[in-house]
Image (cartoon, rainbow, N blue to C red):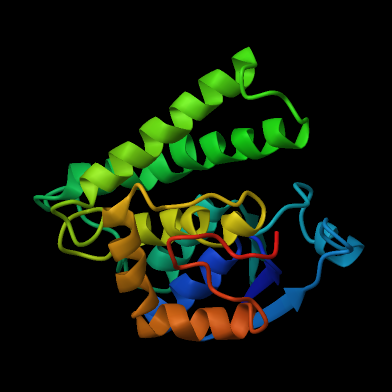
Amino acid sequence: MTLTVHHLHISQSERVVWLCEELGIDYELKTYKRVPLLAPPEYKALHPQETAPVIQDGDLTLAESGACIEYICHKHGGGRLFLPPMHPAYVDFLYWRHWSSGTFMPTVTQSMSLRSLNLGCDSFQMAITSNRFRKAFAALNERLRDNQWLAGSEFTVADVMVVFVLTTVRYWLPYSLKEYGNVVQYLKRIGEREAYQKAMRKCEPELELALGVEPPKKE
């Protein structure tokens, strides 16, 4: 059976498409347009969670980015892009892989939610969230100061997990990277990866890639 990746446009399911290209595995890509902002009914019907990503492999239907990525790497990729416990960079890999979904994504998502409520910059909630936002980016920028990738010298799924928040999310929450030069250089390296280019052409052919210092002009 062919692995099927269901991709909702401008969503974190782009991670799964990119992963498949990095691993060089066969997969079928099905894309879905938003109507106008949320997933269409046919996408919501794929899984009770009604969110992207969703993959299908035979009788299996699986959601959640981390779960989809781990399943694909071990089931179809021979464990590639994961570091084993005996690897010198294993702890770094483990931390940054979980940091992306446990700290970074929630922080940015909360910032998006609060901004949609038009809370003032001096509100208690915004003050806390803005502080966490800055700390997260400062930590990431520092990590990338002397490291090519999040786990060190090897590209891993930790990188696959974090890039969406640094790029496509800026269509939803425009923010500048001018204070984070190491992150900007990191995105330059990401943009040079053939698998990333190929994946984004497949899943987001009309989208301007948000790899620069400033966010896309269209929100």
Q: In the depicted view, which residue is nearer to us: 82 or 111?
A: 111
| 40 up-or-down from 126: above or below | below
Q: Quadrant of residue 84?
A: bottom left
> Where the C terminus falls, by quadrant?
bottom right
Q: Residue at x 69, y 70 (%)?
A: 6
Q: On the picture, is 188 further left or further right than 46?
A: left
Q: Residue furthest left?
A: 88
Work out whether residue 59 can be spotted.
no
On the image, the x and y values in percent for residue 38 come to: 83, 56
Q: Residue at x 61, y 63 (%)?
A: 13
Q: In the depicted view, which residue is nearer to us: 33 or 141?
A: 141
| 110 up-or-down from 167: above or below | above
> Where the N terminus falls, by quadrant?
bottom right
Work out whether residue 137 can be spotted.
yes
| 88 up-or-down from 69: above or below | above
Q: In the depicted view, which residue is nearer to us: 45 or 149?
A: 149
Q: On the picture, is 105 further left or further right than 36?
A: left
On the image, the x and y values in percent for residue 9 come to: 71, 69
Q: Residue at x 72, y 52 (%)?
A: 51
Q: Residue furthest top?
A: 124
Q: Quadrant of residue 75?
A: bottom left
On the image, the x and y values in percent for residue 155 come to: 26, 65
Count of numbered circles on the image: 0
Q: Quadrant of residue 138?
A: top left
On the image, the x and y values in percent for residue 163 come to: 44, 59
Q: Residue at x 43, y 61 (%)?
A: 213
| 207 up-or-down from 151: above or below | below
Q: On the picture, is 46 further left or further right than 112?
A: right
